Image (cartoon, rainbow, N blue to C red):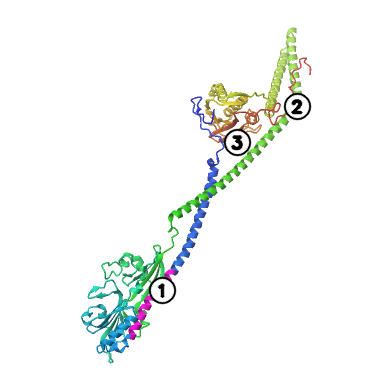
C-alpha cells in the first residue's frame, strides 16, 4: 500500500475517532501560530504606536511651522494695508495745506496741475476731486495707470446722493472721513473692471473756518488686495472680511463684494461657527477649525488712522478682519497608495520576523521535549537493564532451591500415595491416618502449584528483560494479521460488552516479525479490556492502520473508556507499575509491549489520553524491521539462565 492507497473498512462497525499520530509540520503546529500571533500582534502594536508618536511629533512640528508662516503672512499683509491707508492720510493732510486747494474756486487751473502732479507721484490714488457744498464736482482728475485724465465740465458728476458725501456734510474743520471699502461707482453703475476703493474726505475751509468744499481722494485698493486668495502651489489662502462677514478679497468662487453684487453670501451665513471665532478676535489670534489652521488679525480702521492724523478720523467701517489659513498636518494626506504599501510591507515584515522567531522557539521547544523524551527513555531503559540484572541474579539464586523443592515435593507425594496403597492392601485402614495422608497430599499439591507460579513469574521476568521469545522475520500482510487476531477475540470480548472495531487498508505489506506484532496488538487489546472499562458495562476498542509515510505504518489502538490521567501517562510503561493496586497483573504488560516495539520491531510507541474520553496508543512500525543480531535480541538482554532442575526420578534430594 502506498500513501495514497484508499482505506477500506474491514467491518461495518463505526470506529471512534482516533488521533493521527504524526508529528505536525511547523505550519500546522498550534504553538507556532500562538507564538507568531502574539509576537506579530505585539510588533504591530509597537509599529502603530511608533507611527502614532511620529505623527504626533511631526504634526506638532509641521503645524508650528505653518502657524509661524501664517503669522508672518497676516502680519505683512496687515502692515501693507496700514501703510496704504497711513500714507494716503498723510498725503491728504499735506494737500489740505496747499494754497491752490484752499482757493480752488479762484485758482482751478492750479488745482488741476496739482492733482495731475500728485496722481503721477502717488499712484495709489485713482481719483482726486473737489466737491462743492452742494455735492457737485468742481474739479476732478482720474488716474488710469500712467494716464492722467482731467474731466471736462460736461463730465463732472453730482455726488450729493452718495453716502460718503452725506457723511462729509457732518464733518467739522480738521476732521477726516474714511469711507468703507467697496467698489467704485460711476454715473450710478459699478465700474468695470471692478475697482476696490476707499474714499478719504476732508472739508476745505476759509480763514473764518467756513466750509467751502470738500477734498475727496479715491484710494485704489486693488493693489494691496490683489495678493489675497490661494497661494500658488499650496492650500494656503488669505481672505479679507468686512464687519458684516462679506468677502472683500480672497474668495475664488465669485463671492467677493457680495453686498454690492448679486452674490449676497457671507461667511457668517455659510460658516457661522467659523465666523463666530473670527469675529471674536480682538487683535490677533490663531485657532484650528475643521483640520485648518487660522491666523486672524483685526484692523480697527478708526484707531489705526487717528494715530497718524492731526485731526479726528471718522471711519465708516470700524474694523476689517484679515484671515490667513492653511491645512493642518495630515499624515495620510500624501499618496495614499504609497502609505498603504509601506504599512503593508511593514506588517508583512513584522509577520515574517515573528514567524521566524516562532519557528525557532518551536524548534527549541521540540528539542527540549525530545530531550525530555530521551531522558525518560533512558530512565526506562535503565530500569529494564536493572531488571535484567535482577532477573539474572534471582534466577541464579532461585534455580536450585526451586528445583530441590519441586523434587522433594514430588517425592513426598509419591511416597504418601505408596503408603496409602500399602495400608489399604494390609487392611490396616484407619480413618484418622487416611485423613492425615490426604491432608499431606493436598499440602503437596498446593506447594507444587505455588512453585509452578513462581516459575511462571520468573519466565515473565526473563521475557521482559531478555526478550527470549524467538521471532522469525518474514514478509506478511499487517492487515491480515490484525484481522485474524480480531476474529479470534471478537466473540470472547463481546460477551463482556466490549466491541472490537477496525479500520484497515486493503493491504499493508511488511517485512518484520508477525508474531511480535501479534503479541503487541493482543497485549494492548487485553490491557484495554482489563483497565479501560472499569465501572462500565460496555465499550469500544478500535484499531486503525494507516500509512504514516513511505517507510512507516501507523497503528492506533484506541478505546472510549475511562482514560488515564496525565500524571500516570508517563509511568504506565514502567515495569511493575499498575494503575490498580488490587489488580492481579504483574505490571509488566506495557513494559513488555514497549520492549518488543522498540527492540524487536524497531518502532516507537506513545500514548495520549484524556480522563473520561478514552485512550489512544500510537505505534509507528517500519515496513521493514531492522535485522536482529543473534544472541542479542534486546539492548538490555542478560545471559539466559539454565533450566530449573527437573524432579529427581530416583526420589532422592
**457 with respect to 249 (left or right):** right
Magenta stretch holds residue 66:
no
Per the image, label 1 sits on a secondary structure element best described as: helix
Label 3 sits on residue: 569
Quarter of the figure with the C terminus: top right
Label 1 sits on residue: 76
Instruction: Give the residues in magenta.
Output: 69-94
Q: Quadrant of residue 69?
A: bottom left
* Residue situated in front as seen by the camera: 129 or 108: 108
How far separated are the C-alphas under marks 2 and 1?
A: 116 Å
Label 2 sits on residue: 396
Q: Quadrant of residue 410?
A: top right
Q: Quadrant of residue 645?
A: top right
Percent across and percent down for residue 383 are 69, 34
Q: Which mark is residue 633?
A: none
- Give the foreground label among 2 and 1: 1
Amino acid at each position: 500500500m502506498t500513501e495514497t492507497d484508499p482505506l477500506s473498512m474491514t467491518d461495518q462497525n463505526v470506529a471512534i475517532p482516533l488521533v493521527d499520530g504524526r508529528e505536525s509540520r511547523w505550519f500546522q503546529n498550534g504553538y507556532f501560530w500562538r507564538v507568531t500571533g502574539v509576537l506579530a500582534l505585539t510588533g504591530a502594536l509597537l509599529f502603530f504606536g511608533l507611527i502614532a508618536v511620529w505623527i504626533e511629533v511631526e504634526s506638532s512640528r509641521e503645524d508650528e511651522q505653518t502657524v509661524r508662516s501664517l503669522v508672518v503672512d497676516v502680519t505683512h499683509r496687515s502692515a501693507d494695508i496700514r501703510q496704504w491707508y497711513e500714507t494716503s492720510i498723510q498725503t491728504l493732510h499735506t494737500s489740505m495745506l496747499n494754497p491752490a486747494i484752499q482757493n480752488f474756486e479762484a485758482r482751478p487751473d492750479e488745482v488741476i496741475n496739482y492733482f495731475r502732479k500728485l496722481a503721477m507721484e502717488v499712484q495709489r490714488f485713482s481719483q482726486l476731486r473737489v466737491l462743492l457744498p452742494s455735492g457737485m464736482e468742481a474739479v476732478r482728475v482720474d488716474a488710469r495707470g500712467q494716464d492722467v485724465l482731467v474731466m471736462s465740465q460736461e463730465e463732472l458728476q453730482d455726488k450729493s446722493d452718495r453716502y460718503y458725501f452725506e457723511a462729509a456734510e457732518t464733518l467739522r474743520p480738521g476732521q477726516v472721513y474714511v469711507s468703507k471699502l467697496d467698489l467704485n461707482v460711476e454715473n450710478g453703475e459699478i465700474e468695470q473692471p471692478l475697482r476696490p476703493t476707499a474714499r478719504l474726505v476732508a472739508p476745505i475751509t476759509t480763514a473764518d473756518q467756513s466750509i467751502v468744499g470738500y477734498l475727496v481722494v479715491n484710494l485704489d485698493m486693488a493693489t494691496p488686495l490683489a495678493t489675497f486668495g490661494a497661494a500658488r502651489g499650496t492650500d494656503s489662502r488669505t481672505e479679507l472680511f468686512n464687519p458684516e462677514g462679506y468677502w472683500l478679497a480672497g474668495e475664488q468662487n465669485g463671492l467677493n463684494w457680495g453686498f454690492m453684487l448679486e452674490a449676497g453670501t457671507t461667511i457668517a451665513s455659510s460658516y457661522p461657527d467659523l465666523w463666530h471665532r473670527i469675529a471674536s478676535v480682538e487683535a490677533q489670534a490663531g485657532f484650528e477649525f475643521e483640520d485648518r489652521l487660522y491666523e486672524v488679525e483685526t484692523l480697527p480702521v478708526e484707531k489705526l488712522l487717528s494715530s497718524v492724523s492731526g485731526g479726528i478720523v471718522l471711519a465708516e467701517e470700524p474694523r476689517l478682519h484679515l484671515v490667513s489659513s492653511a491645512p493642518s498636518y495630515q499624515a495620510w494626506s500624501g499618496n495614499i497608495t504609497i502609505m498603504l504599501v509601506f504599512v503593508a510591507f511593514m506588517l508583512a515584515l513584522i509577520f515574517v520576523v515573528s514567524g521566524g522567531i516562532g519557528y525557532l522557539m518551536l524548534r527549541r521547544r521540540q528539542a527540549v521535549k525530545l530531550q525530555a523524551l530521551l531522558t525518560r527513555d533512558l530512565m526506562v531503559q535503565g530500569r529494564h537493564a536493572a531488571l535484567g540484572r535482577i532477573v539474572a541474579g534471582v534466577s541464579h539464586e532461585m534455580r536450585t532451591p526451586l528445583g530441590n523443592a519441586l523434587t522433594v515435593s514430588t517425592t513426598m507425594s509419591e511416597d504418601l500415595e505408596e503408603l496409602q496403597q500399602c495400608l489399604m492392601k494390609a487392611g490396616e485402614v484407619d480413618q484418622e491416618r487416611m485423613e492425615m495422608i490426604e491432608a499431606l497430599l493436598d499440602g503437596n499439591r498446593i506447594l507444587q502449584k505455588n512453585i509452578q507460579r513462581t516459575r511462571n513469574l520468573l519466565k515473565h521476568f526473563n521475557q521482559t528483560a531478555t526478550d527470549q521469545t524467538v521471532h522469525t522475520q518474514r514478509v506478511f500482510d499487517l492487515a491480515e494479521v490484525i484481522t485474524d487476531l480480531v476474529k479470534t477475540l471478537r466473540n470472547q470480548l463481546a460477551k463482556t460488552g466490549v466491541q472490537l472495531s477496525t479500520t484497515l487498508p486493503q493491504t499493508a505489506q511488511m517485512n518484520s516479525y508477525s508474531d511480535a506484532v501479534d503479541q503487541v496488538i493482543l497485549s494492548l487489546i487485553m490491557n484495554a479490556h482489563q483497565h479501560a472499562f472499569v465501572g462500565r458495562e460496555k465499550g469500544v476498542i478500535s484499531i486503525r492502520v494507516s500509512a504514516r509515510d513511505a517507510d512507516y505504518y501507523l497503528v492506533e489502538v484506541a478505546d472510549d473508556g475511562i482514560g488515564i490521567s496525565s500524571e500516570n501517562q508517563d509511568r504506565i510503561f514502567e515495569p511493575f507499575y499498575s494503575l490498580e493496586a488490587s489488580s492481579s497483573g504483574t505490571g509488566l504488560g506495557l513494559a513488555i509491549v514497549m520492549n518488543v516495539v522498540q527492540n524487536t520491531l524497531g518502532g516507537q510507541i506513545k500514548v495520549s489520553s484524556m480522563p473520561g474520553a478514552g485512550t489512544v496508543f500510537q505505534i509507528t512500525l517500519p515496513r521493514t524491521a531492522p535485522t536482529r543480531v543473534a544472541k542479542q535480541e534486546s539492548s538490555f538482554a542478560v545471559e539466559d539462565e539454565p533450566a530449573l532442575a527437573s524432579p529427581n526420578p530416583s526420589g532422592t534430594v
